[in-house]
Image (cartoon, grey):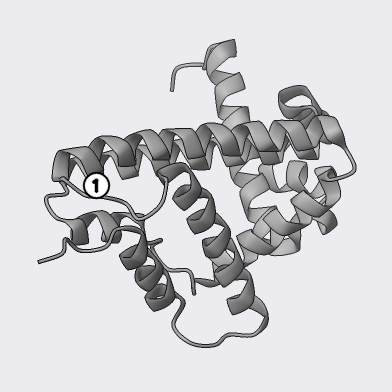
Amino acid sequence: MPRLTRAEQQRRTHEHLLEAGRQVFLRRGFLAATVEEIAADAGYTRGAVYKHFGGKEGLWLAIIEATAEGHLAELRKVLARASTRDDVIAALAPVDVADKDAAKWSAAAAEVLAATAQQPEIAARVAAVQRRHDDEVVSLLVEHARRLGLEPALPLHEAVVMLGALGIGLALRQAVAPAGDPAAILTHVLDSVFPPEAT
């Protein structure tokens, strides 16, 4: 087996730490997770986490950015194939807000927001990642709503913020007090955002 170059080794370490971070944050939440546990799960020392990400918060941001990029890539593909209003609504509905991992991830995200609210520099970085993601989603929706002749019932930048907050809230609720059908609730809200054409 050929030896990895230094850049390839760095990339591999980076990816291993990202994956270990995801798993530890899911398992323990953001506040209880430690740099030592993440590093040990990845097979490295804590120094590797600091070198690659600057600490736990930096690792969280890197995971969020990678997740956002994956979400946008998938959304681009699905919306490009959309030919009806119902296709757009299905593309915007999350895979499964009742999924236990989604609920755990939402709980960890809520911990991050609470923990960083008093740390303006980190809060600004979290907000910047969210803003970039939201702006990309809005651009995609504007493009495809125009292409399909859809008239949103409210400005799309407001709809994207509302849907993101609702998705997180529903996932958190499922983790604490499961009730109703969260997917049906989201679909109903999306129905209101993209009302059918009047006949």
Percent of width and height locating residue 174: 58, 78
Q: Is residue 192 above or below residue 61?
A: below
- Residue 126 visible within the image: yes
193 lies left or right of 23: left
Quadrant including the C terminus:
bottom left
Q: Residues within 10 Å of mark 1 (few under 14, many from 20)?
A: some
Front residue of 99 and 154 = 154
| Secondary structure of residue under mark 1 | helix
- Which residue does the image show at 56% across and 65% down from the upper left? 101
Quadrant including the N terminus:
top left
Percent of width and height locating residue 78: 24, 47
Figure disc tally: 1
Front residue of 53 and 117 = 117
- Which residue does the image show at 38% across and 63% down from the upper left? 95
Q: Is residue 86 above or below residue 13?
A: below
Q: Which residue is mark 1?
A: 78
